[in-house]
Image (tube, rainbow, N blue to C red):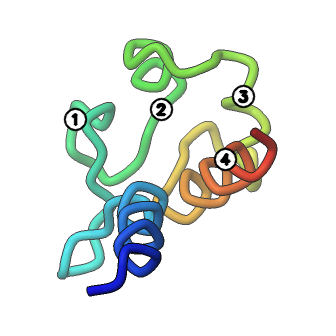
Amino acid sequence: MRPSFLILAAALAAASTAMAAEGRFIHPADTNKDDRLSKAEWAAYKLPAAEFAKADKNADGLLDGHEFGAWYMARQASK
């Protein structure tokens, strides 16, 4: 495999919201394994507190895989 492909694959794997084969959102911060991150789980994982509201696009108080992935990609792009 080409190195550029491996870098892209690694970035997508990290930011793809760790979707499992069956479409589940898997992230170590999701301690109750409901495929979403609550604000408490976000904070316990030491993610930037001010960023939770930015990531929660539908303002339901929970982040699904798509919201987390979009936030992660935007954060990486801004670095």
**Mark 1 or 3: the one toward you:** 3
Q: Is residue 56 left or right of residue 1?
A: right
> Helix or strand or loop: what does disc 3 sit on?
helix
Q: Marks 1 and 2: in contact by CB < 8 Å? A: yes
Tell me what residue is drawn at x 55 percent, y 51 percent. Answer: 68
- N-term mark: 3 or 4: 3
- Report which residue position mark 3 lands on: 51
Up/down of 59 relative to 42, above or below: below
The image quadrant where one finds the C terminus is: top right
> Helix or strand or loop: what does disc 2 sit on?
strand
Quarter of the rendering containing residue 16: bottom left
Front residue of this view, candidates 6 and 37: 6
Looking at the rendered structure, which numbered label has been put on residue 76? Answer: 4
Q: Is residue 58 left or right of residue 5?
A: right
Q: In this view, does 43 lie to the left or right of 51?
A: left
The image quadrant where one finds the N terminus is: bottom left
**Total numbered labels:** 4
- Report which residue position mark 1 lands on: 32
| C-alpha span from label 1 to label 4 | 27 Å
**Mark 1 or 4: the one toward you:** 4
